[in-house]
Image (tube, grey):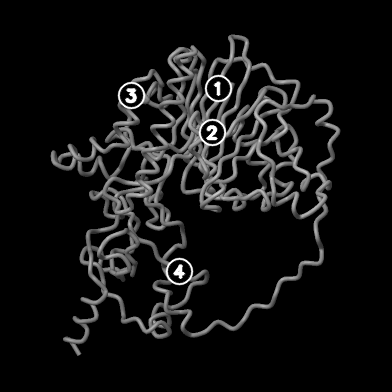
């Protein structure tokens, strides 16, 4: 059985979705951070030859999380699905659990997207949410192992398990004070507790001491160019499946997200269910042309873990969707000059500010879609001519602090090159200058 896990950073950003599923070449494909609500889902993600899909939608923080699983019809249809741990802690659509029968007994497949938060990140609420989630996950896995069940845990766990899993940590590992603090954060301690239960990290099973293999990069800092990232995505198996791990791959060449997919092959022979759970998207009335009213769409029924229908009945369901042809795009309004005030560099690459890629990834910035001369940008935005970085003598990039704290909202200049190991000449240098200090310098010169 092959299984893939991939944080896709928004499922609607992916094109040719059916081809992507074929390329991933797996029996079970688990996505995280789908960033879609049920009313935004269309048949292009559900009407797929050979696959059935299930979604966990957030009830709060809509558009920021969500997970989904795709099961190959011929090999891996689950007998049931559920969307909570034992304590029912998740309202953000971060859990999808499927129940399978195999030739060796029951198997639980758990797909999770752990909240992002850092001990020194300035946002205690999100960090506490992360710790609560990890604690609930540990309790749930512990309860399954107590029943001697086979467990397969996949997803974005948002934890860098060791120094080898973080480019930042590797660069600072010679500092004993940094290392001691870094290794003892509460989320890492909880991750080790998960390992102590007998869960096996499939990557480390084959590569116990391998460095510089990452699954997430900060796109706003162009960190993927120099492979300066983190490994926070995992496929883990319970100890009874340890000797059945056949292979593991990090598909770092697969683009489309700030994460890359990971894939494992495990010597488990699943028995595909003859009945499909009713929470499968094939039964969504809004996708079958049987939506009776707007209220039916808004008041989505809660998933029923144990209800299913025969496969033959499900195949008879038509999932054709009527697409409206009357939607005309509204003409764009003339942009105001003030709109250019947020434009800061024509050389920047637009991207998601992914704080989890590195400790220095605490800024974000906007950029134009078309290349515009920097002098014109500075004129329109009222910005002074940027300074040049000290090492490369290149025009610096203006960014804004988004990390919680006293400097949040302040702007500063830094090197425009991609973040990377300090020994590479093509990596971002240490140049840093507050925006207001640059303004003072220019006034003094004039």
- Badge 3, how many Cα within 10 Å: few under 14, some, many 20+? few
Which of disc 3 and disc 1 is earlier in sequence?
Answer: 1
Q: Is residue 168 left or right of residue 177?
A: right
Q: Looking at the image, which residue is at 53% across and 36% down?
A: 95
Cα gap from disc 3 to disc 2, whole angstroms: 32 Å
Q: Secondary structure at mark 2?
A: loop
- Relative to 267, residue 263 above or below: below
Among the two numbered marks 2 and 4 on one chain, the one whose residue lies closer to the N terminus: 2
Please report contact status of discs 1 and 4: CB closer than 8 Å, yes or no.
no
**Residue assigned mark 3:** 208
Total tally of numbered discs in the picture:
4
Q: Closer to us: mark 2 or mark 4? A: 2
In the image, residue 95 above or below residue 392: above
C-beta proximity under 8 Å, tags 2 and 4: no
Q: Closer to the N terminus: mark 3 or mark 2? A: 2
**Mark toward the start of the polypeptide (2 vs 1):** 2
Q: Secondary structure at mark 4?
A: loop
Are discs 3 and 4 less than 8 Å apart at CB?
A: no
Residue at the disc numbered 4: 367
Distance from Cα at disc 2 to Cα at disc 1: 13 Å
Mark nearer the N terminus (1 vs 4)? 1
Residue 107 horizontal/vertical position (percent) = 57, 18
Identify which residue, 23 or 435, lies in the foreground. Answer: 435
User: Judging from the image, what secondary structure is the residue with disc 3 in?
Assistant: loop
Which residue is depicted at the point 72% across and 27% down? 307
Identity of the residue drawn at 65% across and 29% down: 305
Q: Which residue is mark 1?
A: 108
Q: Which mark is residue 84?
A: 2
Distance from Cα at disc 3 to Cα at disc 4: 41 Å
Asked if the residues shown at circle 1 and circle 3 are in contact, with their CB atoms under 8 angstroms apart, the answer is no
Residue 26 seen in render = no
Query: Mark 2, residues whose alpha carbon is within 10 Å: few (<14), some, or many (≥20)?
Result: some
């Amino acid at each position: 059985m092959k299984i893939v896990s991939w944080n896709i950073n928004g499922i609607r950003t992916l094109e040719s979705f059916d081809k992507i599923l074929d390329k991933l070449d797996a029996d079970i494909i688990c996505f995280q951070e789908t960033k879609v609500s049920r009313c935004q889902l269309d048949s292009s993600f559900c009407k797929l030859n050979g696959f059935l899909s299930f979604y966990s939608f957030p009830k709060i923080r809509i558009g920021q999380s969500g997970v989904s699983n795709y099961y190959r019809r011929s090999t891996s249809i689950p007998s049931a699905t559920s969307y909570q741990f034992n304590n029912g802690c998740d309202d953000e659509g971060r859990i999808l659990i499927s129940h399978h029968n195999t030739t060796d007994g029951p198997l639980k497949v758990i797909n999770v997207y752990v909240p992002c938060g850092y001990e020194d990140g300035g946002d205690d609420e999100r960090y506490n949410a992360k710790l609560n989630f990890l604690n609930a996950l540990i309790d749930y896995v512990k309860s399954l192992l107590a029943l001697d069940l086979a467990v397969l845990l996949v997803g974005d766990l948002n934890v860098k398990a060791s120094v080898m899993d973080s480019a930042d940590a590797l660069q600072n590992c010679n500092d004993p004070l940094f290392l001691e603090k870094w290794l003892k954060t509460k989320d890492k301690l909880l991750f080790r507790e998960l390992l102590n239960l007998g869960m096996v990290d499939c990557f480390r099973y084959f590569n116990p001491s391998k460095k510089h293999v990452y699954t997430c990069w900060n796109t706003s800092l162009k960190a993927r160019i120099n492979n300066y990232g983190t490994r926070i995505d995992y496929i883990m198996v319970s100890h009874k499946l340890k000797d059945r791990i056949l292979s593991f791959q990090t598909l770092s060449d697969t683009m489309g997200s700030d994460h890359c997919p990971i894939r494992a092959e495990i010597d488990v022979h699943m028995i595909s269910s003859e009945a499909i759970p009713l929470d499968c998207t094939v039964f969504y009335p809004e996708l079958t042309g049987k939506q009776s009213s707007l209220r039916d769409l808004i008041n989505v029924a809660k998933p029923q873990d144990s209800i299913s229908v025969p496969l033959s009945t499900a195949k008879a369901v038509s999932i054709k969707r009527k697409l409206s042809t009357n939607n005309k795009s509204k003409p764009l309004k003339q942009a105001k000059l003030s709109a250019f005030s947020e434009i800061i560099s024509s050389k920047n690459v637009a991207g998601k500010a992914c704080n989890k890629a590195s400790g220095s990834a605490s800024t974000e910035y906007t950029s134009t879609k078309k290349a515009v001369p920097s002098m014109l940008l500075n004129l329109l935005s009222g910005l002074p001519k940027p300074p040049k970085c000290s090492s490369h003598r290149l025009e610096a990039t203006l960014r804004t602090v988004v990390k919680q704290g006293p400097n949040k909202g302040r702007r500063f200049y830094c090197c425009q090159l991609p973040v990377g190991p300090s020994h590479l000449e093509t990596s971002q240098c240490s140049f840093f200058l507050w925006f207001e200090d640059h303004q003072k310098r220019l006034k003094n010169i004039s």
